[in-house]
Amino acid sequence: MRSFESPGTLKRYRRMALDFQQTFQTPLKDLDRFTDVIISKLPQTEAAQVIIDQVVFEPRCELPGLFARHSLPQQWSGVDRIVEAQGAMEVRELLRAALSEWIDFLFVPTPRPFVIYADHDEYITFLAQRKGKLSGVVTALAAADFRAVDYVRKL
């Protein structure tokens, strides 16, 4: 796992045509199961990046411990701060930790069937260029009784 700055990264994603989306309420008391459902729909994921957009409150839940375990500097903000994970286990760990904090971030898996934007208001939006790329994760989350919300995200 590594952390670095990459100015302009969020701007590039905001310009992408991610016309299809679905938003869910982030279940803070059920993050393990929620994260597992999401990761189950990314079976070929080799890596992922969390691009921190905004730090509302200094991380104090899971990111500090994650950074410490991977010997990363405890830097949360900066110009497009990116935390990059390699392998399925690290990717799951990073997504889970980021969802536990009061930050706004973009989660980009590799390969990229969809991207996720999560915010400190406990909404998580799945965005894709084609509707078919979203159907698997949306169906799985709904089947697991996670609550979809009527919300249109503008990156």
Image: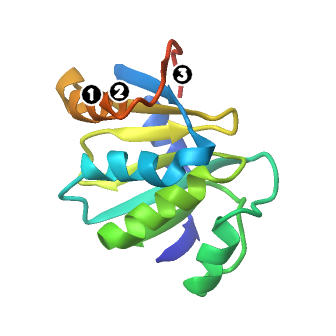
Amino acid type indicated by mark 2? Ala
Residue at x 30% of width, y 29% of height: 143
Name the residue tied to disc 1.
Answer: 139
Left or right placement of residue 80 versus residue 16 in this view: right
Which residue is the extreme one toward the right? Answer: 57
Q: What whole-number distance in Å separates the C-alpha atoms at marks 1 and 2? A: 5 Å
Residue 38: x and y in percent read 35, 46
Disc 2 crowd, CA 10 A, few/some/many (<14, 14-19, 20+) = few
Left or right placement of residue 115 versus residue 147 in this view: left
Q: Disc 2 on helix, strand or loop?
A: helix
Badge 1 vs badge 2, beta-carbon distance below 8 Å: yes
Indicate which disc, 3 or 1, sits on the residue closer to the N terminus.
1
Name the residue tied to disc 3.
Answer: 154
Amino acid type indicated by mark 3? Lys
Residue 106: x and y in percent read 51, 45
Residue at x 68% of width, y 80% of height: 73
Residue at x 35% of width, y 27% of height: 142
Does the rendering let one see residue 110? yes
| Quadrant in the rendering for residue 119 | top right
Amino acid type indicated by mark 1? Thr
Disc 1 crowd, CA 10 A, few/some/many (<14, 14-19, 20+) = few
Name the residue tied to disc 2.
Answer: 142
- Front residue of 15/36: it is 36
| Quadrant in the rendering for residue 74 | bottom right
Is residue 65 positioned above or below 33 on the image? below
- Front residue of 82/97: it is 97
- Front residue of 37/102: it is 37
Does the rendering let one see residue 105? no
Q: What whole-number distance in Å separates the C-alpha atoms at marks 2 and 3? A: 22 Å
